[in-house]
Amino acid sequence: MTLSGGDALAEVYAAILDRAPEHDFAPTIDRVREVCELLGDPQRAYRVVHVTGTNGKTSTSRMVERILREHGLRTGRFTSPHLSSVTERIAIDGEPISPERFVEVWQDVAPYVHMVDQRSQAAGGPRMSFFEVLAVMAFAAFADAPVEVAVVEVGMGGTWDATNVVDAEVAVVAPVAMDHERWLGHSLTDIAGEKAGIVKDGSVLVLAEQRPDAEGVILAAAAERGARVLREGVELEVVDRRVAVGGQLLALRTTGGLYADVFLPLHGAHQAHNALLALAAAEALLRDGGALDAGVVEAAFAAMDSPGRLELVRTSPTVLVDAAHNPAGAEALAATIEEAFGFERLVGVVGVLEDKDAEHLLAVLEPVLDEVVVTRSTSPRARDVDELAQVAVEVFGEDRVHRADRLDDAIALAVDLAEQGVAGSPTGAGVLVTGSITVVAEARILFGR
């Protein structure tokens, strides 16, 4: 019997998922490098922009890819994690590869993956991890397409990330904050050092504004590798930013000049800064830092979307989903809610994974939420609802905290709570689903996204 595309995808995905999970970080890229060598180094068949940071990686990667595609280049994009289907992680010309193509790529690389698995296990090591396999599949899919340039988002960190077998001409380091301390280090300088590992000899580094201690580490790494640095606040600047209907109007200054009245259909100061980094990266790759065609840039940004990032999934009442899962992400989210939305009453639906700082995240969100419903996704890493409720009570007080074991029940309860006291106001009631990428992914599915 021949499996359908969807059935075959499910079977292959289950087999890959049976490997070590992507959050199980191992400080080596040897296995990925070995498979790539057996495949003929597909990651060297195209130019690469490599993107890391703590928050903003995916949005920035999508922006870079969109600008390059608008300039007529054939593009590949590798991002993580996915929201609805694993195929989202590997996109060609902006579109996820089909389930059938995903299966074909796996069949192409599987013999070499198994060969390296056997060598590793014979030496007392593990099989390749889930994320390592997906990175290899992306590199192979891009070479086979073939693409002219790939935008590759780091999974975690930089130096030892599976994607760091690429030899990127342009490295982008978005803002660095505390996250994944168990794997990347317990100080900001340690984490910054890991992120700086993607900067290659003679490349261009596009650097977001950082805390001084993190910036020092990254600049030292760039100097050691002879990289040319384009720094936000020095060569790069968000000159102006105005809230507009459906997004914001930006003026962005780069080494290529000033791009004025650029409409970005995404909310928040953080997205404006992501746009600046993306524009500078595209300039560095395409024009060696010179100006791009303003009309092409405007068209690229006007077509931008970023699923799961302050995304509207329902109206009346307004339901927003946002994948903020650490305090820095929550700070950007809270600031954007206050700037761009005029809710009379906003209720949060929050589910957090076990390894995250739930107390700090909830404390950042507390000023913008009237009440909160704590819940969990179906992820085995999701924090227990009762445990999360106890943390929420410490932050919000008992009267403002509710709990629901199922996400659908949590959203229904939040909608009811939001609509209390705002009768007759079509825009006054809002629900915000946030706290983890898994809870946002499942909420989007509930709303048909």
Image (spheres, rainbow, N blue to C red):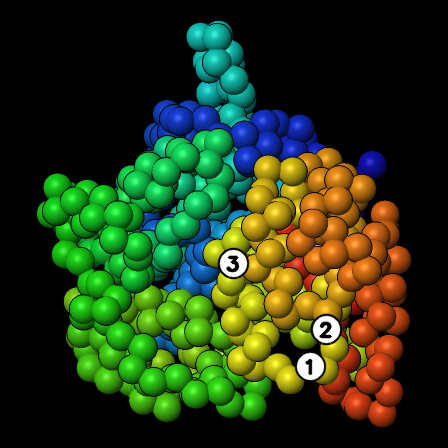
- Look at mark 3 in the image and give the residue it sits on: 329
For the residue carrying disc 1, how many other residues have a C-alpha within 10 Å: few (<14), some (14-19), or many (20+)? many
Does the residue at mark 2 contact the one at mark 1 (Cβ under 8 Å)?
Answer: yes
**Left/right of residue 321 with respect to residue 138 in the rendered view:** right
Q: Amino acid at mark 2?
A: Leu
Residue at 41% x, 50% y: name it.
Answer: 177
Q: Which residue is mark 2?
A: 346
Residue 195 shows in the view: yes
Q: Give the residue pinned by disc 1.
A: 343
User: Is 331 situated left or right of 149 in this image?
Assistant: right
Is residue 22 shown left or right of residue 421? left
Q: Position of residue 184 (x, y in %)?
A: 41, 35
Viewer-closest of 285 and 82 = 82
x, y percent for residue 287 = 20, 71
What residue is rendered at 18% in x and 70% in y?
Answer: 235
* Pair 3/2: label in front: 2
Q: Residue at x 37, y 56 (%)?
A: 175
Q: Position of residue 234 (x, y in %)?
A: 18, 69
Give amino acid for label 3. Answer: Gly
Q: Nearer the viewer, residue 196 or 1?
A: 196
Where is 125 relative to 447, above or below?
A: above
| Front residue of this view, candidates 77 and 125 | 125
Q: Circle 1 — which element?
A: loop
- Label 3 or label 1, whichever comes before in sequence order: 3
Q: Note whether 195 is above or below 229 in the view shown.
A: above
